[in-house]
Amino acid sequence: MVKKSDKKITLIAGALNLPILARDCLRAAGWEVFVVGIRGFYDPALKPDLVVRMGAGGAVAKECKKHGIKNLTFVGALGHPNLSDIRPDLWTMGVFLKVLKNQKGYDSMARAVIAGIESKGFHVLAAQDLCPDLTFSAGVQTRAKPGKDDLKNIERAVQVSRVIGAEDIGASVVVDKQVLALEAAEGTAEMLKRVIEIRKKWKLKKPSGVFAKMVKPGQDLRIDTTALGPDTVRDVAAAALRGIIVDSKNCFIIDKQKVVDTANKHKIFIVAK
């Protein structure tokens, strides 16, 4: 639990504009935010207080100590970098010693990274817990509502998403009575392109089916978050799917109003579970 008197936090920013939204949300909530941009990833519009290369944890720790900051939060995509692609400094090597012992999957590695960071005296906080306004509350978010057939697809999509998530394969799935596609390392956009090709091959023109982007069972949301933005909504529309399912309170919504407006434009429903 964060004490009211300890309202300093370092936001470590990856790609896209979600770090900007999180920074503004934190400041509006009374946090004093020190922003660190990861070189090659962060949006220049963020205008971070410090820019570091990936693996330069020591430089971040030094600045945090200087500013009396013990709370950290990670926001924004970094992909799934290989350890060989990172040039860690000595501070970061100390963290990676834990990671190297936990290479069973991305989730276990993420938890090991957090354990390593916290062993050095920091507290890693989940940004979505601090910024609930950047997530959806449970329920239907759009004018379009799921029908009877949609509800069956939703139930199946959530079930499959949990299963593949538990195996650390991915957490996104497309279901139209049967499973059409699972997201693996290629990412959401590429998975939805495959769905477009499947529907063309099967000559399925009428919108049907759902896309589910769910949190994995046991996923540590302090460093590994899910997000939904307008681009994904447009990709779902291009794939002629009926709707989208996300986790309530856990999935970041990038530009919430635009996401809802885009879904309404394409007559797509969004349900937060």
Image (tube, helix red, strand yellow):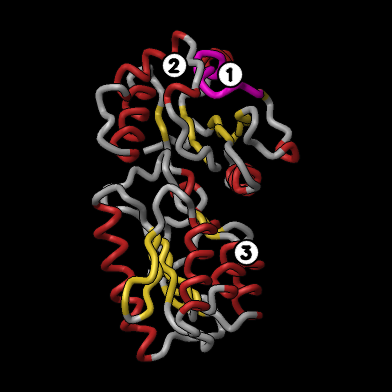
Q: Give the quarter of the image for residue 221.
A: top left
Residue receiving disc 1: 67
Residue receiving disc 2: 92
Name the outermost residue toward the front. 201
Neighbours of disc 3 within 10 Å: few (<14), some (14-19), many (20+): some
What residue appears at the point 54 percent right and 71 percent down from the top-left corner? 236
Of badges 3 and 1, nearer the viewer stands 3
The residues colored magenta run 51-60
Residue receiving disc 3: 230
Callout 3 secondary element = helix
Callout 1 secondary element = helix
Q: Is residue 133 visible in the rendered structure shown here?
A: no
Left/right of residue 173 with respect to residue 27 in the rendered view: left
Neighbours of disc 1 within 10 Å: few (<14), some (14-19), many (20+): few
Of callouts 3 and 1, the N-terminal one: 1
Q: Is residue 203 visible in the rendered structure shown here?
A: yes
Residue type indicated by callout 1: His
What residue appears at the point 42 percent right and 47 percent down from the top-left corner? 185
Q: x, y percentage for residue 140?
A: 46, 78
How far apart marks 2 and 3 lie (CA) works out to 35 Å
Is residue 201 a member of the stretch shown in magenta? no
Rendered view: 17 above or below 207: above
Q: Please identify the quadrant where the C terminus is shown.
A: bottom left
Residue type indicated by callout 3: Pro
Q: x, y percentage for residue 22?
A: 59, 46
Q: Give the quarter of the image for residue 103.
A: top left
